[in-house]
Image (cartoon, helix red, strand yellow):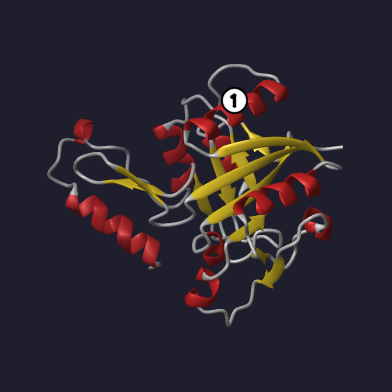
Amino acid sequence: MSSRDLILGRVRRALADVPREDTPPVPEVPGADARYERAVGRSYLREHGARSAAETVDLLAENLADYRAIVHRATEDELPYVVGRLLAARGSRHVLVPPGLPPAWLSAADPARVHDRAGSTPRELDEVESVVTGCALAIAETGTIVLDGGPDQGRRRITLIPDHHVCVVRVPGQVVASVPQAMERLDPARPSTWISGPSATSDIELDRVEGVHGPRTLEVVLVREG
């Protein structure tokens, strides 16, 4: 008997004295998965309203701003100068660089590059003012950026410790409308970080404090592909 069979057997025994009409369908073996999917159903909307690609990107920008992220738009040629301007405006002397970040993105920036190394301590990372990354994708309906540790994003910690995060999103290719669409494109075997605005929390008086669990400032650059 497999572990799966053992667990499902325990579930059935636990529900033995409950009227059948009051219980959700319990998978049975073999062939349980397909029957369970049919019983549960997946009737929820995968996207709320029909939008063009441009309208989806506009919705993303609107929801990012609603979460207090700072949104910029640029062409691929303009991107290095936009990134350089954002780092200069922060007065950043050092910038964290993921291993696969395209060199051109920082070609117009002056700060010293600090590379993502396994041996870097939290104290060392805390001395870096900014980090520049790409993303796995962005979700328009929720204003969420998703990182999955790809080469242009680096380890999760480099986007949590610095106070300033500049995240580049290629549009429309990296933009999806909804969470269900995002789940279809993400690799479940990769660690993911979902970011909706800068890190923030509130106490019982609802006084908002930013930068507690991550960057105090999130700047998102929407770069038109092609």
- The quadrant of the picture occupied by the C terminus is top right
Q: Position of residue 62 (x, y in %)?
A: 56, 27
Q: Position of residue 222 (x, y in %)?
A: 70, 38
Q: Which residue is mark 1?
A: 59
Residue at image point 51% right, 79% down: 121
Question: Residue lying farthest left?
Answer: 17
Tell me if residue 137 comes above or below residue 117 in the rendering. Answer: above
Residue at image point 48% right, 74% down: 122
Q: Position of residue 223 (x, y in %)?
A: 75, 39
Q: Quadrant of residue 1?
A: bottom left
Q: Quadrant of residue 57?
A: top right
Q: Residues within 10 Å of mark 1 (few under 14, many from 20)?
A: some
Q: Is residue 31 left or right of residue 5?
A: right
Q: Position of residue 171 (x, y in %)?
A: 73, 36
Q: Nearer the viewer, residue 207 or 193?
A: 207
Which amino acid type is shown beneath numbered disc 1?
Answer: Leu
How many badges with numbers are in the image?
Answer: 1
Report whether residue 135 is seen.
no
Tell me if residue 96 comes above or below residue 81 in the rendering. Answer: below
Label 1 element class: helix
Q: Is residue 41 left or right of residue 75?
A: left
Residue at image point 23% right, 37% down: 23
Q: Is residue 174 left or right of residue 216?
A: right
Report whether residue 181 is seen.
yes
Residue at image point 49% right, 54% down: 215
Q: Nearer the viewer, residue 102 or 6?
A: 102
Q: Nearer the viewer, residue 96 or 59?
A: 96
